[in-house]
Image: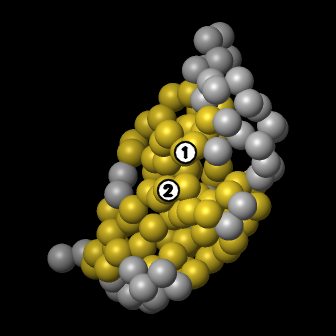
Amino acid sequence: MILQAAVLADQVYRDARTGKHVVAGTFHQLEVASVPATFTGPATLFLALRDVDGPVELRLVDDAGEVVLGPHAVEIERDLTRLPIEYAVQLPPLPLARTGHYALQVAAGGTVLGEAPIEVVTAA
C-alpha cells in the first residue's frame, strides 16, 4: 500500500457532479488558548492511497512517538488497479497535553506509511 497524500483540512467534500474531492482550508498548525486542550475541529484528514489491500490505522502521536489517540481502523475497499483511492476521515476531538509537534500517522500492517504533521502553539 502506498500513501500518496495525507492532508489536514477544515473541510473535504465530494462534488456530486464530477466525483472530485475538494480539500478546503488546509493547515498544519493548531492555536489553542492554553494547554492541556482538546481541539474539537472541524478537522478532516484527506488521504490518497494506492495499491490498497486492507484497512489502514490512524493514530495521533506526540514528538516522542507516544500514541495520544488511537489507533482507529479505517476500512477501505480493496483496490489493486494502481490508481489512487481518495478518502476523507472526519477527525474526533484531539487531546493536546502540551504545545509542540504531533502527527496523524497512517499505518497498514504494522508499518507507518506516512503522516500529517501538526504543530500546537498557544495564542500570543
- As displayed, is residue 106 above or below residue 53? below
Spatial CA distance of label 2 from label 1 is 7 Å
| Residue 32 shows in the view | no
Q: For the point 46% across and 51% down, which residue is it?
A: 8
Side (left or right) of 117 relative to 91 = left
The percent position of residue 51, horizontal first and vertical second, equals 67, 36
In the displayed structure, 11 sits above or below 108; it is above
Question: For residue 69, which quarter of the picture?
Answer: bottom right
Name the quarter where the N terminus is drawn.
Answer: top right
Q: Are marks 2 and 1 in contact (CB under 8 Å)?
A: yes
The three-letter amino acid code for the residue at tag 1 is Leu
Residue behind mark 2: 114
Q: For the residue labelled by badge 2, is the local secondary structure a helix, a strand or a loop?
A: strand
Image quarter (top left, top right, bottom left or bottom right) of the C terminus: bottom left
Which of the marked residues, 2 or 1, is nearer the chain's N terminus? 1
Residue to which mark 1 is pinned:
3
Give 27 or 42, whichever is nearer the viewer. Answer: 27
